[in-house]
Image (cartoon, rainbow, N blue to C red):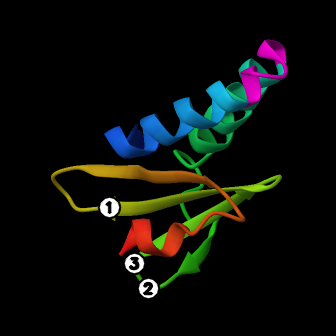
Amino acid sequence: MPLRVIFTPDASASLDSIAEYIALDSTSAARDFVLTIQARCAALSDFPQLGRVYNHSYRVLVEGKYLIFYRVSKAAAEQKVTIVLVAHGARDFRSVLE
């Protein structure tokens, strides 16, 4: 059974911020970036273990220069994948995740 994929408000804001930055150079590249990230996240619905384990609390999926941090919950009440953060690999994401 596919899991539900949700974005936290912080993850949505970080994705929007990255897209706005990319759009300064190219709106089509920004749109393509968002669609690519959304497609990668949607794949987690069927393959939640796709990313590698990060810091025992998260899994991380790499898309180009960007990292998608997420958690998988398989509790009987609600099975879901929660996207926690989308960040450029050069960003200090450790402080955000702690």
Category of crowding for the residue at label 1, using alpha-carbon neighbours closer than 10 angstroms: few (below 14), some (14–19), many (at least 20): some
Which residue has dot 1 on it?
73
In magenta stretch: residue 26: yes
Residue 98, position in %: x, y?
35, 75
| Marks 1 and 2, the one that precedes in the sequence | 2
- At x 61% / y 33%, what residue is drawn? 38
Q: Is residue 93 left or right of residue 24?
A: left
Say which mark, if any, is on residue 56: 2
Residue 54, position in %: x, y?
54, 79
Q: Label 2 is placed on what type of residue?
A: His
Residue 43 visible in the snapshot: yes
Q: Is residue 59 left or right of residue 8?
A: right
Q: Give, as a single range, the part of the protein colored magenta.
A: 22-28
In the picture shown, does residue 15 fall above or below 62? above
Q: Label 1 is placed on what type of residue?
A: Ser
- Mark 2–mark 3 CB contact (< 8 Å): yes
Q: How many marks?
A: 3
In the picture shown, does residue 60 fall above or below 29? below
Which residue has dot 3 on it?
57
Q: CA distance from mark 1 to mark 2?
A: 14 Å
Residue 50 visible in the snapshot: no
